[in-house]
Image (spheres, rainbow, N blue to C red):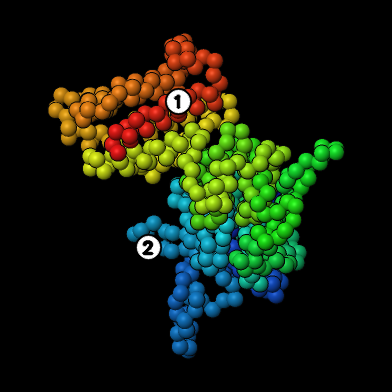
Amino acid sequence: MLDFYFKDVVGWIKSDKRKSTWTTVYKHWEENGFQEYLFCVLFPEKLIDEFVEQPTWSLNITNLRPDYAHYSEKDPKYYRWGIESKYEPLVYQQFYNNIFPTKFEIVEEFLQFFNLYFDNKNNSYISVDITSEQNEVVKIVKYKDNIEIKVKTHFLRQFLFAKKVVLGFQMDYFRESDRTLTEQNLSEKMLFDEFTQLYNFNICFKDYTFLDRCNSDSRLLGKSILFGYESQNIQTDYDRLNSGKCEDFIVDVNNDNGDYIYEKCSKSEFEETKYGYYTSIFFKREVLLKYYNSPNIFTIEDGSLYMKGSWRLYIDNNNYEFVSAYLGDLRILPHSEQLYWKSFNIEPQLEVDQRRFSIDFLSSYYHPEIEDLKFKNKYIRLNKLWLKKFGFNLFSEFDENDIHCFKTIRLPLKNEATELDVLILNLCKVLIDYLNIKSFNRSLDSEQKELRSIEKLEIFLEIYSFNNFEKTIAFYKTLQKLRSTGSAHRKNSDYKKFLVSLGFENLDEKGIFKALLTDAIDVLENLATQLE
């Protein structure tokens, strides 16, 4: 039960609100014998004394909208919020006479200032900065007819600094009790209040023993202040991109004592130093896991890592043991990303191989050699050849909610069963579930149309005289059985026996998926060769 004397609320009123991660800027909540109404206003710092002087509200959310104010013996005058006031809201209400649901909105100036996007799924506003970094800035919590709007304090204080205003909290809270005031040694004449330069509140009591409701309630009326930052390092987008910190990375090992030698990534292509722009920096392959786990934002291709709408880092990801990038290229990463990559930094592994040298410096093209990159290239190539031959894709276009299944196919970055399960499921989805069955059906009779997708593929390949199609179908059945006996269901002895039958019993998770990808590449290449 909530405290009848509002000790929790009083503690918050007196606290340093700058330290809170989130700040509630609007609240209308009625539940289980309490009511909480909070409405914040913006105003110049010089009005703090006037604002705090009385606990009664200085501005109410009701009917705030652009309109004319009508005063006796004066012509109507237009005001931004329809009233002549030195205060302005951060949240405003749109009321439609209960014909349509009432809406509560953050003022557009705040939304535009931080370039906020409304996320319908999570009922929140997300900021997207020049480097495509995302931050949840506003959270809207709804329950029945109740609503609470919270703003991340750091962003709120930036806004207050920019506008040269402070934020004033106005509170009107009620709490009910089953006990009478007499039972609590209280009376309606009693008033607890406190006044300082930065807050003001009073608590009074009401007896309802004569009504068919709670026996008593307490009410808190209060006000408090949140200040913006005292100063800000104001930068343009260009400044933010080009004046960031540059981390140092391992470029060599001291042959005398074994210590690592570091160089900052702030290297110019034209700077002639021992460890220059094109010094290869090496990282554990696990550095890519973060990006595979966010395929809607990041894309990993042969030779590059791309963040949607922002940066592209050129990398050599054609190696089983590590990933490398040029020292100077790492500067393109935001500082937080540089720190992330630095945590996976390892000592130099070898000289730049011939493939990397030819691609980067001789403008040559080499097909990738590592299985996950080869698979994706073969998959796309086969689909194009199939379309040219038959007039439809072998594999249907991915649904936007499934594209990640293709983008995240990779050699496992760790020897863990969970990662292998996910990768097998994704491989099954892109190779089996996305077979273009509707187009296959045009070549099948009514009885054949009732068959399963792999069986339909087998008939189609036989109709058009594909060589060695039995090998293709055998691989598809193997993949389907791995999903049904292991990845999609509880593993048992049948799964272990099947691994043995495939010759996988002595392979770790990385080895198993590498073998599957190798077989998949052979199947795709075999089909593509016959279509050329």
The amino acid marked with disc number 2 is Asn
Identified at 56% across, 71% down, the residue is: 88
Q: Which residue is mark 1?
A: 516
Q: Residues within 10 Å of mark 2 (few under 14, many from 20)?
A: few
CA distance for labels 1 and 2? 63 Å
Q: In screen coordinates, is 393 left or right of 196? A: left
What is the x, y in percent for residue 163?
Answer: 62, 71
How many numbered marks does the figure carry?
2
What is the x, y in percent for residue 18?
Answer: 71, 57
Q: Quadrant of residue 462?
A: top left
Q: Which residue is mark 2?
A: 97
Q: Quadrant of residue 486?
A: top left
Identified at 45% across, 23% down, the residue is: 487
Identified at 27% across, 26% down, the residue is: 467
The amino acid marked with disc number 1 is Leu
- Is residue 124 at least partly visible in the picture? no
SS type, badge 1: helix
Residues 80 and 363: in front is 363
Q: In screen coordinates, is 42 left or right of 258? A: left
Q: Is residue 390 above or below residue 26?
A: above
Residues 4 and 418: in front is 418
What is the x, y in percent for residue 409?
Answer: 47, 35
SS type, badge 2: loop
- Is residue 78 at least partly visible in the picture? yes
Residues 436 and 502: in front is 502
Q: Earlier in the sequence, mark 1 or mark 2?
A: 2
Which of the two marks, 1 or 2, is nearer to us in this view? 1
Q: Residues within 10 Å of mark 1 (few under 14, many from 20)?
A: some
